[in-house]
Image: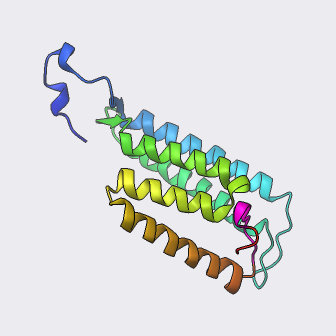
Amino acid sequence: MSDTWQEGPAEARRSWPFDCCSRRGGLWIATILALTGIGFATEALKLTFGNLDLPGPGFFPFALGLVLMALSVAIFVMIFQEPREAPKVELGHWPVIITMAAMSVATALFEWAGAFLSLGGFMLVMLTTVGRVRIIPAALSSVISMLVVWYVFKVLLGVQLPTGPLEGIL
């Protein structure tokens, strides 16, 4: 958090990132996490759960929904323990915006492009834009990571992820 930009005259202040009360921001985040967790859990109830030895397709989304709901409750508790006049925090930093946009694109492309291209592309974008890693090491890291993901899911777990255009290769 940086307060130095607020010390200048009003016309010299930046409009982005903007400042927000940490209580209000925390309430928004907790609410979004709770709604997302409820959505995951509700949709997971439509799938089979399996058991602990052989989890079904609804097991992990339901568990993720429960974790998100528990985290939102923890955030609510932390917020209500803060003093009424909570400090201001800056919202709208570029790395966060880039991450949200890249996650949205990866999600939209997951079925069409396949898990490996969409997740590998997400990793490449994150490493180069947010992590400031050069393109060659970032691309190598993405490829190696996607090979590990393929090995874990396909070989160890026996789960077929969407392959998209890599249908015949993987």
Considering depth in this image, is 152 or 34 the residue closer to the camera? 152
Q: Position of residue 32 (x, y in %)?
A: 58, 42
Which residues are drawn in magenta? 159-166
Residue at point 40%, 58% (across, down): 127
For the C terminus, the quadrant is bottom right
Report whether 119 appears left or right of 8: right
Identity of the residue furthest to the left in this view: 8
User: Quick check: can you spot residue 80?
Assistant: no
Q: Quarter of the image holding residue 1?
A: top left
Q: Where 52 falls versus 13 (above or below)? A: below
> Considering depth in this image, is 56 or 110 the residue closer to the camera?
110
Residue 154 location (% of width, % of height): 70, 79
Instruction: Note whether residue 149 is visible.
Output: yes
Count of numbered badges drawn on the protein: 0
The answer to whether residue 164 is magenta is yes
Q: Is residue 129 above or below residue 92?
A: below
Q: Magenta segment: does it hold 5? A: no
**x, y (%) of residue 99?**
46, 48
Q: Where is residue 25 in the image (x, y as percent from the top left)?
A: 43, 36
- 61 left or right, relative to 126: right
What residue is at 57 percent from the left and 41 percent from the top? Answer: 31
